[in-house]
Image (cartoon, rainbow, N blue to C red):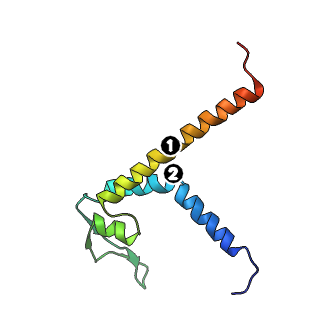
Amino acid sequence: GGGGGGGGGTNFLGQLFTKTSFINYAYDALLINEFLDAGTFQFTPKWNDAAGHSRSQISVDVTGREVLQFFSFGDSHAKLAADVTMLCAIAGFYLVLAFVLLKASVRRFGVSD
């Protein structure tokens, strides 16, 4: 692959947004909470045969942990705790940021009582 520079910068920004996005941690925590200790699921793939008839003769039992591993989500209670901790840290950061911006705007524009 040729191309000019800048590909690394785009990749870095993508990773930065992924690591700092609350959606990433919230969705991961949601799926871990739903699937980790949920028991066994039956995966029944459906397909059409050559005649166009819908078929589903196979049924595969999978655990919630296998579902999480297949889709590359966390698969432990420790990962769930880490996700919730990151969500709290991000929320705390946004609260502090809002407070600092509010204080800065009050100093800049003044407040009349």
Decide: is 110 above or below 10: above
Give 79 or 113, whichever is nearer the viewer: 113
- Up/down of 107 relative to 28, above or below: above
Q: Residues within 10 Å of mark 1 (few under 14, many from 20)?
A: few
Q: Secondary structure at mark 1?
A: helix
Numbered tag placed on residue 22 in the rendering? 2
List x then y, in percent, for residue 64.
29, 64
Residue bearing the label numbered 1: 91
| Quadrant assignment for the C terminus | top right
Quarter location, residue 41 = bottom left
Residue reaching furthest to the left: 39
Q: Nearer the viewer, residue 3 or 67?
A: 3
Dot 2 or dot 1: first in sequence order is 2
Left/right placement of residue 96 relative to residue 42 reads right
**Amino acid under label 1?**
Ala
Secondary structure of the residue carrying tag 2 is helix
Which residue sits at x=75%, y=22%?
Answer: 110
Residue under the image location 37 percent in, 63 percent down: 74
Q: How many numbered dots are placed on residues in this image?
A: 2
Q: Which mark is residue 32?
A: none
Is residue 31 placed above or below 94 in the rendered structure? below
Q: In the image, residue 36 lies at what x, y percent?
A: 29, 60
- Left or right: 93 as drawn, with respect to 50: right
Does residue 27 appear to the left or right of 69 in the view shown? right
